Amino acid sequence: MAQNNVEQTLLGPIKRSEQLIERVLFHRRITFLLLFLVITLALGYQAIQIRPDASFVKMIPTNHPYVQNYLRHRDDLSGLGNSVKIVVQSRTGDIFSAPFQQVLQQVTDEAFFIKGVDRSALKSIWTPNVRWTEVTEEGFVGGPIIPPDYDGSPQSLEKVRQNILRSGQVGLLVANDFKSAIVQVPLFDRDPETGEKLNYQAFSQKLEALIRDKYQNDDIQIRVVGFAKIVGDLIEGAQSVAVFFAIAIVITLALLFIYSGSFAGSLIPIICSLVAVVWQLGLLRWFGYGLDPYSMLVPFLIFAIGVSHAVQVVNTIRLEQVAGADAWLASRRAFRAIYIPGLTALLSDGLGFVTLSVIEIQVIQDLAVAASVGVAVIIITNLLLLPLLMSYTGVGQRAIRQAARRTNAGQHWRHLSVFATPKGAAVATATALVVLVVGLWGSQNLQIGDLDKGAPELRADARYNLDNLFVTENYATSSDIFVVMVATPAEQCSSFATLSRVDYFQRYMAQVEGVQSSVSLADVSKRVTAGLNEGSLKWRSVSRNQFVINASLSYVPAGFMNGDCSLLPVIIFLDDHKAQTLSRVSESVERFAQQHNSSDISFEMAAGNSGFEAATNEVISRAQYEMLAWVYGVVSLLCLLTFRSVRTVVCIIAPLMLTSILCQALMAAMGIGVKVATLPVIALGVGIGVDYGIYIYSRLNTFLLEGRSLPDAYLETLKTTGSSVAFTGLTLAIGVVLWVFSPIKFQADMGILLTFMFLWNMLGALILLPALTCLLRRERRPEGDS
């Protein structure tokens, strides 16, 4: 009696909503179909207007102390945030030729006028904010590197050479071998006039059209590195998702027809799943969202989830028609059979995706919204629209005959039903434990962050990574910049106490593995002080005499201190941005700050692309297990509310957890770090995989309640739901495995990981779930036994 009361309390409202929806839906079919059509057209109009949406700020954890420090000093750190470097390289000689200098000037001018550029901070040897200085018997002299009377003559070019050597820009804006030069282009995240976010796709296209395509020729090579170019290349490459999406649709349609034997039963699930994608994109556009490079894969996943659930619906309709029901009655019965397990599975998917929002990085939170909205619309398109359409067509006589033959000849499933017997269950569980140990051992090597040089989202031979390698090999400073902000009271950043402490900090950091070099206001003071003393190396130090320091800082290049002399950045150039390098640097700076911070000076992290990545790695390191705990907690709770059995929850969740651990081991083996691009994969895999377990157990429980033994009940489950689960897992795996051919490496990595998770989740539901059920299930005693 207590059991019945619990069932009524938990399932009463759901059952009543099922009965109400079924009655209204199937007696007002035309009305609802017209309503679905109108909504699809309206949201379809919104969907075609959705645009790629990427932002530098979205990619970094804005609540992290590092980023908060940067945002507080943002206006004083010109050029140390989001920027790109345009490298103009001479293929045939060096930079000291009139044609090369003309191209470099034109590239500088072109970059200056591109929308989104912080023009006040743009630098090249052609901009007036890059100067040379020299000490003569008359005192300091200096000026812009390109003299006012430059005319391209050999004499002018020789003067340019001398100015470059005196400017200290060799290795910074001019290559060590003098065969290339850099135009450094800082960017605004928002247009200062309109307030609109920088369109990275448009910016990248302008770089290509206005600079690379226009000026690259047999004599000149143009190279571009920086966050904006990475995003632009990702958006361009991610458009190949549309091609893989189309191929996946064709493959899925063909396999559905082979499996079901019904044209309507193949086409309608595809249509409903595509409608779900259209609704998702339309709603995202309506809510003000776009698609960034990392969420462009979500529509495919929504399509995959839609197909997964649609196969269950169509399979149930087909079985009902085999039993003699017409199309309308079979669809109604299928709706009744699928409503609760389908709703539970989809709610588990959606709430599981919502848990991604615990990671305080906006790009991941946006992905969580996109995935959750997509799952929400599947509840409507696949649980309501699909059976409604199938009520008109049914699956056809050919599919009915094929299903009848398969049901009668389904004894080949007995090979799997052995895992529902004690002996088979023991073997399966023991094997799973061995695999678990192997997975735990392999996952110990899983690392946080990037494990490769360059942009790991792109392939090693991608043009961007080749450009980045060129900069690293030919300049004294790499493109991996870690900026430490040194804060002081106003007018104190140039005091001896401050500069001597900063100089000591730079020498301390030079001993840290992975640090290439560093530069700060202290270096400017030391260089000029030596120049004031005939270049003597004995004077190349921070003077104790404040008047000498003041003289050495009579002219300070832009970016080395702020207006009221309360902040000076220490720019640290790293060998790479690998996770281990960033961790070592962060820990070293933290140790130094703890020992030397006071009310007069404070060493604060961090700006620069590597500083932001270090902050991102810390957030992901803390959040990855918190996210998994939330995912499994939410899914377990919903399963518990649905099946009212802890044992059942264990049977459904354990295979998913095993797959997650094995996925981590696979990532470690493949050298894939946990980062913004890969962290959501495990949550997405769990969200899709839980569907298998819920459908399998729901059908298995139905046969058990009829009084069948576990092996017989599981055999009948395999003949019906089991076959569709196996088909779905294989179909989805075939669809995503094509991603390995993508030019975008992180998409190829996701294809491998999702294929692995789809297959292992399927095998877990078909093998480990019945095994655990057999071991944990208590046999019911016949009524009347004491």
Image (spheres, rainbow, N blue to C red):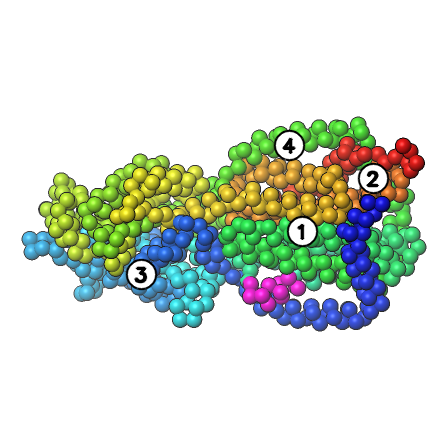
Separation of disc 1 and disc 3 at Cα? 47 Å
Tag 3: Cα neighbours inside 10 Å, few (<14), some, or many (≥20)?
some
In this view, 648 is above or below 195: above
Spot occupied by residue 151 in the image (x, y as percentages of width and height): 21, 64
Circle nearer the viewer, 3 or 2: 2
Among the two numbered marks 1 and 3 on one chain, the one whose residue lies closer to the N terminus: 3
Q: Secondary structure at mark 3?
A: helix
Tag 2: Cα neighbours inside 10 Å, few (<14), some, or many (≥20)?
many
The residue that label 1 is drawn on is: 349
Spot occupied by residue 39 in the image (x, y as percentages of width and height): 69, 69
Q: For the stretch drawn in magenta, what is the main secondary structure?
A: helix
Spot occupied by residue 373 in the image (x, y as percentages of width and height): 64, 59
Circle nearer the viewer, 1 or 3: 1
Q: Amino acid at mark 1?
A: Asp
- Left-right relation of 734 to 146: right
Separation of disc 1 and disc 4 at Cα? 24 Å
Q: Which mark is residue 714?
A: 2
Q: Amino acid at mark 3?
A: Ala
In this view, 116 is above or below 323: below
